Image (spheres, grey):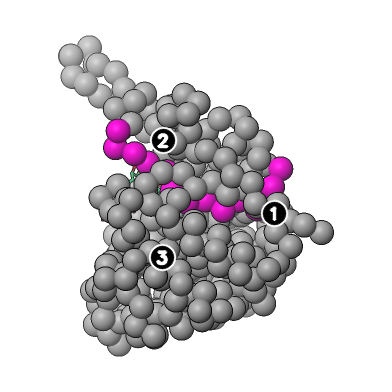
Amino acid sequence: MTKLIALLAGDGIGPEVTGEARRVLDALALDLAFEEAEVGGAAYRAHGHPLPPETVALAQRADAVLFGAVGDPAFDALDRALRPEQAILGLRKALSTFANLRPARGFPGLEEASTLKPEIARAIDLVIVRELNGDVYFGDKGRRTTDAGLREGHDLMRYDEAEVRRIAHVGFRTARTRSGRLCSVDKANVLETSQLWRDVVIEVAADYADVELTHMYVDNAAMQLVRNPAAFDTIVTGNLFGDILSDQASMCVGSIGMLPSASLDADGKGLYEPIHGSAPDIAGQGKANPCAAILSAAMMLRHSLGEAAAADRIEAAVATAIRGGMRTPDLGGTATTRAMGDAVLAAL
Ligand code: NAD
Ligand code: IPM
Ligand code: MN
């Protein structure tokens, strides 16, 4: 049966990188249908809202969502509810995609692009399981002027035990399919949300005697990630810490343009997107690295469409293109977005 993919390209380099992902998917000749909709700044321009109801409806109706990026500096001064970023936050909530898998794996031949020593970069093979529907992202926020006339802003950091429990299970199950080591990252020495997080993760661990659980404070985790990333296998952490650590992990591999992600709901339905943003500094210049988007399409095939073999083929093709020396500017080369897409297609 034909599977429907909602293709939400978004802003900046979003359309450029999802365009290459689409070409790769088309080349596999699977039974897929694509429907596009506007999202982010593009949707605000066209419809006056970054996440129009038709876009949400399409995402909910589709078998999977392939997402580019949102964000446009032209809209940074808008009321927060109308900013492009609200589109991805709103979609994650609307689709209940609470589990964000962000794998980071070293690519043979790419070590020179990493800021780490080659032998350290080469050995990276970890996945960050990031909670995506809670934390300081979705707690009450506001700004006001105090009685003393000072401007004040606040964002409530909040988790309940059900939210922690369900992501902890994903963390343990993910670790089980890998090396069986799970590191829970928090800030329990300071934050009550993190103490709750740690307590609940320890409770859930009782169901997974075969998984080795450790805990680490997020500041130490940031340091260990550049000291010896190969020491990590599966990391489970909250929304904010996972956001930050995954950008850091990408540079350990070589570029933020290399890391894909899967955002899954309880039934395995998902939204797939690169971890990077709309990169306004290089948008429209053909400089963006499409690998993260192409690898996100592979994750989509594997996790939501039952096409594991096709996913393997895409991942192998990206590795071949990289090993063959294809390099966009973020990787130290001069290849265009299209040339990288061509190299992946040639390797398929
Ligand atoms: P960014 O990820 O867009 O860019 C950071 C840096 O990495 C830039 O120098 C950019 O040129 C580079 N970069 C990113 N992706 C690249 C790629 N595929 N190839 C080559 N280089 C790449 O982060 P930012 O600059 O902090 O944010 C820009 C906008 O994107 C903001 O509006 C932000 O809110 C938004 N954003 C959106 C998402 C998303 O849609 N999921 C994610 C992150 C940031
Ligand atoms: C990401 C982005 C988003 C996040 C922003 C754009 C809301 O940084 O997907 O990593 O913080 O989750
Ligand atoms: Mn981010």
Residue situated in front as seen by the camera: 210 or 303:
303
Q: Amino acid at mark 1?
A: Ala
- Mark on residue 33? 1
Q: Is residue 194 visible?
A: no
- Mark on residue 41? 2
**Could you tell me residue 282's position as x and y percent?**
28, 53
Q: CA distance from mark 2 to mark 3?
A: 24 Å
Q: Which label sits in the foreground, 2 or 3?
A: 3
**Could you tell me residue 78's position as x and y percent?**
34, 25
Q: Amino acid at mark 3?
A: Arg
Secondary structure of the residue carrying tag 1 is strand
**Could you tell me residue 260's position as x and y percent?**
47, 63
Q: Which residues are magenta?
A: 61-74
Q: Earlier in the sequence, mark 3 or mark 1?
A: 1
Q: CA distance from mark 3 to mark 1?
A: 22 Å
- Is residue 170 on the magenta stretch? no
Q: Which label sits in the foreground, 1 or 2?
A: 1
The answer to which quarter of the image holds residue 322 is: bottom left
Q: Are marks 3 and 1 in contact (CB under 8 Å)?
A: no
